Structure formats: C-alpha cells, structure tokens
Amino acid sequence: MSGDASGEGVRLQKVLAGAGLGSRRTCEEFISAGRVVVDGEVVRQLGSRVDPRRAVIHVDGLRVQLDDSLVTLALNKPVGVVSSMNDERGRPDLSRFVADRTERLFHVGRLDAETSGLLLLTNDGELAHRLAHPSYEVLKTYLAAVDGKVARGLGRTLADGVELEDGPVRVDAFTVKDTTADASLVEISLHEGRNHIVRRLMAAVGHPVTRLSRTRVGPVVLGNLKEGRTRVVAGRELGALMKAVDL
C-alpha cells in the first residue's frame, strides 16, 4: 500500500534521495510539507514506506523516475552526423557518442545531418513514444543563421502562420539575435515536428537557413554542453520532461 508505515518496502525519503531529489533531510522536508504524492495521495508521514518498483511518485507535480535501469541523455549532435544508431550506408551516426553505454538507447526524433544541437537519447520506451507522438509535441527552440536582413514584421507573420506544401505552420516565439546587411541570426520556438520544418519555413519567407542548431527540447536546454558530448537528464529536469508528455 502506498505510504505504508509497516516494515515492508523502502522508506520514502530514502527513495527520493536515491532518485536525486536531494539529501534525506531535504526529502524529509518535502514530505512534511505535503509536496510528495504517492499513487495519487499526498503523503506527510516520515515513516512511510513504498515499493519503488511499483509506486508512482510526484514531487511538486513532477514525476520521479524510480527505475534506475532507465536513462535519458542529452547529446549535442555535430553537423555531418545522421540521426541513426546504426547507419546502413556507413555514414557517421550516433553510436560513436554512446559507445561506452551498456543500455540499448534510442534517439527521440531526428535532426538532419546538416543540423547540429540537442538530441535526446533514451531507453525509456514510453517516454520516447510520447515525445515522438504528434499529440504530445513539446516546444523546441532553434538558433538559425539565415540569408538576408530580417524585416521588423516577420515575427508577426510567422506567428500568424505560413502556408507550406503540407499545411500551415505557426511559430510560438521569434527573436532576432543579430543582423547585418545580408544575414541575420534568429531564434525560433515552435511545437512542430515535421521534417526540415525550420528550413522550409524560413525559405518560404525569403530567408534560407545557412546554419541551424537546436538549443532546447521542452525543459531540456543544450546550455554549454560541448559538441559531441552527452550528459544525463535526471532529477527535476527529467521530471519536467515527463510532465510535458503527461507522465
């Protein structure tokens, strides 16, 4: 039973601390403050025990990943690498960046070979499925170098929607970061997941992309992660990612 104070299971604060939520003392404070929900019920009793194999635990509304066999990684994919774990044509693929991992990882979504930046890798099948499913599309942010000086009203045009051959696309946010007489650096955020959507969108409004990098997927930010490197997505960051797809 969730929140059971009997001798069965593992103490809740130990489970939370083991999942990276903080020290046991910090996790005890979470419990006492009513910030921990186990299987849909708020648990405030410090002696509560849970079965980490079965319990569904949320802290501050964020799911806690209790299965330590599951891992999610953020990768800064370089240009020239295809979004495949084993490319049949022998092109540089993602496998080289996780050669030291024992898990069988899957890439979530794709970046074309000429696009760099944030790509998620995981062995959590349900998380991967939801992140890739159209009904759960999370916000993605890109930094794009484009031809031409961007006109002041372009952001409004993109927010209103641009008709492409496979339907309209609207951006959630558009910011001009830098501009010269013949080129601009722009940041674009959108929920779309169609192939080459940013390149096709900017070409349609007269500003072909010359360089493109994805900097954010939902709550996961590329930050200062070096090209070709990975880092583990865990704790609150993973919880926020899971929340974005209703897990």
Image (spheres, rainbow, N blue to C red):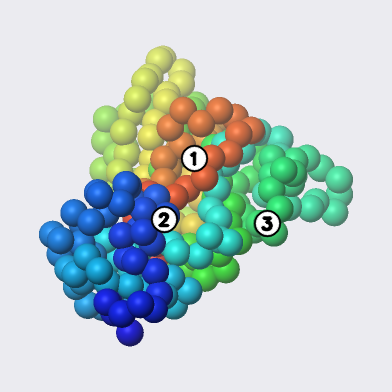
Closest to the observer, 10 or 224 = 10
The disc placed on residue 214 is 1
- Amino acid type at circle 2 is Ala
Q: Amino acid at mark 1?
A: Arg
Name the residue furthest front.
7
Task: Indicate the amino acid at tag 3.
Answer: Glu
Q: Nearer the viewer, mark 2 or mark 3?
A: 2
Q: Secondary structure at mark 2?
A: loop
- The answer to whether residue 204 shows anywhere in this view is no
What residue is disc 2 on? 19
Residue at the right extreme of this rendering = 89
Marks 2/3 in contact by CB < 8 Å: the verdict is no
- Residue at the spot of label 3: 103
- N-terminal of the pair, mark 2 or mark 3, is 2
Query: Could you say which is closer to the camera, residue 33 or residue 88?
Result: 33
Q: Residue furthest left?
A: 33
Label 1 Cα neighbours within 10 Å, binned few <14 / some 14-19 / many ≥20: many
- Residue 232 visible? The answer is yes
Residue at point 80%, 51% (across, down)? 87
Between disc 1 and disc 3, the foreground one is 3
Give the SS element for disc 3: loop
Q: CA distance from mark 1 to mark 3?
A: 25 Å
Residue toward you, 151 or 72: 72
- Front label number (2 vs 1): 2
